[in-house]
Image (cartoon, rainbow, N blue to C red):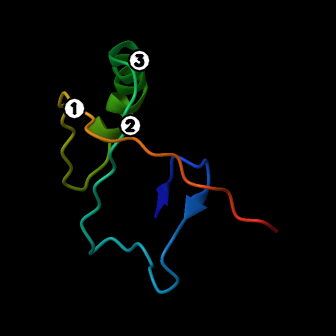
């Protein structure tokens, strides 16, 4: 599942998230916005009883190409 650069949420049809499937969520944004987001979510993740990991990495964007929106 993802949110494409064309502002459309997409998801494979046979995908279901369960507790047994590792999940990676990547967010690309300005560092200040990421830091504020971490301040909000960190207490939530501190209180869950499942294993988790939060990492922050710098990204170099090589290509950013907008897609086209689906016609409905």
Marker disc for residue 36: 3
Marks 3/1: CA distance?
18 Å
Task: Work out whether mark 3 precedes mark 1 in sequence or the reverse, and give the earlier one.
Answer: 3
Marker disc for residue 44: 2
The answer to whether 62 appears left or right of 2 in the picture is left
In the rendered image, the residue lying farthest to the bottom is 14
Instruction: Please give the name of the residue rendered at 44% of the width and 80% of the height, measured from the top-left corner.
Output: 15
Determine the image quadrant of residue 56: top left
Q: Label 2 neighbourhood size at 10 Å, few (<14), some (14-19), many (20+)?
A: few
Q: Quick one: 35 or 49, which is closer to the camera? A: 35
Estimate the x, y position of residue 66 in percent, counting from the top left: 52, 46
Task: Work out whether mark 2 precedes mark 1 in sequence or the reverse, and give the earlier one.
Answer: 2
The answer to whether 65 appears left or right of 8 in the picture is left
Estimate the x, y position of residue 5 in percent, counting from the top left: 51, 46
Q: Quick one: 47 or 10, which is closer to the camera? A: 10
Marks 2/3: CA distance?
14 Å
Q: Nearer the viewer, mark 3 or mark 1?
A: 1
Determine the image quadrant of residue 68: bottom right
Q: Label 3 neighbourhood size at 10 Å, few (<14), some (14-19), many (20+)?
A: few
- Do labels 2 and 3 touch, CB within 8 Å? no
The answer to whether 28 appears left or right of 67 in the picture is left
Instruction: Please give the name of the residue rendered at 24% of the width and 56% of the height, measured from the top-left corner.
Output: 50
Determine the image quadrant of residue 58: top left
Instruction: Please give the name of the residue rendered at 18% of the width and 45% of the height, measured from the top-left corner.
Output: 53
Marks 2/1: CA distance?
25 Å
Instruction: Please give the name of the residue rendered at 38% of the width and 19% of the height, measured from the top-left corner.
Output: 30
Q: Nearer the viewer, mark 2 or mark 3?
A: 3
Vertical relation: 69 (above or below) 63: below
Vertical relation: 5 (above or below) 68: above
Residue at the disc numbered 1: 59
């Amino acid at each position: 599942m993802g949110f494409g650069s064309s502002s459309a949420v997409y998801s494979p049809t046979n995908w279901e998230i369960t507790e047994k499937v590792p999940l990676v969520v990547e967010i690309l944004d300005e560092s200040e916005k990421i830091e504020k987001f971490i301040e909000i979510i960190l207490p939530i993740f501190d209180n869950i009883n499942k294993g988790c990991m939060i990492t922050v990495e710098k990204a170099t964007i090589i290509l950013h190409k907008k897609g086209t929106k689906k016609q409905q």
